[in-house]
Amino acid sequence: MSIIQVEGLTKSFRIAERKAGFFGAVSGLFSRHYRNVEALRDVSFEINAGELVGYIGPNGAGKSTTIKILAGILVPSSGRCEVNGRVPWRQRRDHVASIGVVFGQRTQLWWDLPVIESFDLLRDIYRVSQDRYVATRDELIELLDLRDFLDTPVRQLSLGQRVRCDIAASLLHEPTIVFLDEPTIGLDAVSQLSVRAFIKQIAEERHVTVLLTTHDLDDIEAICDRLIVINDGNLLLDGTIDDLRSRYGDGRYIAVELESFKDVPHEHEDLVVERSDSHILFCIENDVPAFINHVLAEYPVKDLLVTHPPIERVVASMYQTERIAS
Amino acid sequence: MIHAIGLFGRLYLTSIRAKMQYRAAFILLVCGTFFIGAMEALGIWALFDRFGNLGVWSLAHVAFLYGTVNIVFSSVDITARGFDTFGAGLIQTGQFDRVLVRPTYVAILVASRDVGLHQLGRLLQGLLVFAYALYALDIDWTVGKVLLYVFAVIGMYVFFFGIQIIRATMCFWTIETLELVNMFSHGGQETAQYPMSIYNESFTKFFTYVIPLACVAYFPIVAVLEVDEPLGSTMLFQYLSPLAAFVFFGCCLFFWFFGVKRYQSTGS
């Protein structure tokens, strides 16, 4: 059953154009030119309860705009949108009581208060009963390993600690849907791994629907079963990661480790992704076995590894293909 | 609604506690606002000492008006600080989005987010001037006058609070807080400290019928002090005039709701 329905969603902003420099700023006070920016053009998708969906696109693609519309913050220019059977911006208060939102770059916690007091205030804002609150809170503290800094003011937390607290804060009222806007941005590798593992676990245990925007495709591979890609306000792809690969990057990476850097033929330069004295990395679209045979015959091969191209590369090639197409 | 009021109380106390963490800044700011107010009051005293009365208004009469206005204005500054710093604190930083994803009234979260405790100094100063006026004037307090005075004080509070809401609402269009609107907040405070009868007629009309500042300060206090009134208002008008502030406040709230809706359809 679909819990989020988006149909023909369009949003345009009127942006005042500024001329550069001081005099430009002054003249902008008196006459302004406006320009319409289409942040979303006719975007449609449905998300079922319990799905973990990654929402990606380059900067300015319209990801945040979509999240803000789904969260009831913005009203679209046209199109239909229902979340949990409600129109977000019309029934804002009822709607937001059943969702959780994390903006990775902004905290929802009270800057000068200990973490635990922020949690208490959220209990009051969301009117969670004391029993449920204590049970949920303690479980989240346990899962996210927050115990050591519950009494620390938020302004003194590290980014990794703060993001974990923010995620816990967004789940205290047991929402059925969680929107995560770049939750792993700026985190170190260890924190990234723990945040990913947690999102996956909590979504499965509590049957929470997750819509996650990110620039880090490892997030998607680790967490999501489905991927929606937008670029320039248009929906480019809605499918699994395998769909993405088969459409835009159905090749193989062949990493060759060399015995010596002598006697290495310089050929197929268009297929070489990386080259060093001891390594060559090829990206091959067709007839992989034949190419491997060729390499084994002509190159001083010490070792050879065949892999999928990293998803970054697939997405980059997709953006490029679409840019040429449009 | 009851839940919302209780929630406001809790969040507001939280903001007070957060402010108190910066103790040195708090103490210095309180002393600062106290002495700024005290210098101003001293200036008024010096003028009266040199030039005598202002028409029928003695120093004690002006002190009564001045004290009242400053008590109320600083109370508004203390309690409506969230609206005061709305542009820089919520709109420019994009934090307003966070406010919109909470299942309660936006105005409650905005109002309780910040508290202007530094104005306690000004409040104290206003109370001292007011105490002097009470001591010097020997007012014949009837039940009617007490009720009128309370009515006027609440009206004045609501009036200045409304101005702060307008200031904040403008930020939906301008992003920044407009200094222009300070004309009505701080300018209004300055204006209301003195009897309206000293200003010229069009100015007085503007502050009666357009921005109903005189309706919560001058007119009701004329009735309380029983001084002669050269503007020719009737006793009935003086008793009813604070009502205008509530109408004004309603308009301010309406403007606020309109602003929030606009943000939702244009914000980025």
Image: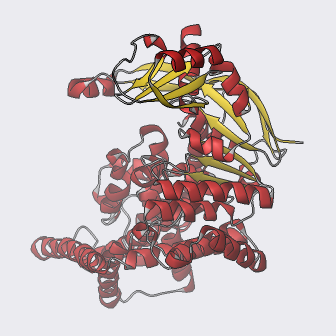
In the figure, B110 relative to A88: above or below?
Answer: below
Residue in front for this viewpoint, A71 or B31: A71
In the figure, A225 relative to A30: above or below?
Answer: below
Residue at (39, 58) in percent of width and height: B231
Confirm whether residue A267 shows in the render.
yes
Image position, residue B167 (x, y; %): 44, 50
Q: Quadrant of the C terminus of chain A?
A: top right
Residue at (78, 56) in percent of width and height: A204
| Colour setting | secondary structure
Q: How many marks?
A: 0
B241 horizontally vs A226: left or right: left
Residue in front for this viewpoint, B186 or A72: A72
Residue in front for this viewpoint, A122 or B121: A122
A133 horizontally vs A149: left or right: right
Residue at (36, 28) in percent of width and height: A260
Image position, residue B180 (x, y; %): 34, 45
In the figure, A211 relative to B75: above or below?
Answer: above
Residue at (54, 9) in percent of width and height: A324
Answer with the quarter of the image where residue A27 lies. top left
Q: In which quarter of the image is the N terminus of chain A?
A: top right
In the figure, A262 relative to A81: above or below?
Answer: above
Residue in front for this viewpoint, A161 or A63: A161
A140 horizontally vs A294: left or right: right
Image position, residue B252 (x, y; %): 55, 51
In the orientation shown, which residue stands out farthest toward the left? B50
Answer with the quarter of the image where residue A288 lies. top right
Image position, residue B120 (x, y; %): 35, 78
Answer with the quarter of the image where residue A195 lies. bottom right
Confirm whether residue A326 shows in the render.
no
